[in-house]
Amino acid sequence: MRRVYLAGPPFADEYRKRAAALVAAAGLEAVDPMRRDFRGGTVGHETEIVEGDLADIDSCEVVLAAFTTPDEGTAMEAWYAHSRGIPVVGYTGGSPAHPWAVYVTRSLHAQLEDAVAALV
């Protein structure tokens, strides 16, 4: 089964829930890094967080990145995947796309359903 890494801001719970359901409905497996939830307790766990995210990205065939609000982690995850040759599909929620988001993505979509359809 094709694995999809869900990149997005740490407090984007609604995005993660909707994306995971849509990804599963498309016959794909969602990999959500927030299963290792360090919100409110990241200090002292930076290496564990980043290395876990990198390993998760490396285990996936594609990345779904929520570029709905500026987030350093999402940007770094998308850049890492892009640099490794792993396709990145972006979801903007209608927000204007940043030039870096355009650069690292295979495609950008205002609607999450369209972004998930582009994963297949």
Image (tube, helix red, strand yellow):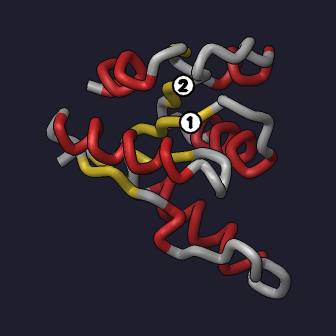
Q: Separation of disc 2 and disc 1 at Cα? A: 6 Å
Q: Amino acid at mark 1?
A: Ala
Q: Which residue is mark 2?
A: 91
Residue 42 image offset from top left, x and y in percent: 77, 78
Crowd tier of the residue under label 2, counting other residues whose Cα lies within 10 Å: few below 14, some 14–19, many 20 or above = many
94 vs 56, left or right, is right
Q: Are marks 2 and 1 in contact (CB under 8 Å)?
A: yes
Residue occupying image coordinates x 33% and y 51%: 30
Q: Is residue 79 left or right of residue 89?
A: right
Q: Which residue is mark 1?
A: 65
Judging depth in this view, the residue of 47 and 115 nearest the camera is 115
- Say which residue appears at 79% left-offset and 15% top-offset: 99
- At horizontal 82% and vertical 87% (from top left) the residue drawn is 44
What kind of residue is marked 2? Tyr
Furthest residue in direction bottom, as rendered: 44
Instruction: Report x, y in % for residue 88.
Output: 52, 30
Dividing the picture into quarters, in which one does residue 27 lie? top left
Give the numbered dot on residue 38: none
| Disc 2 element | strand
Looking at the image, is 42 positioned above or below residue 8? below
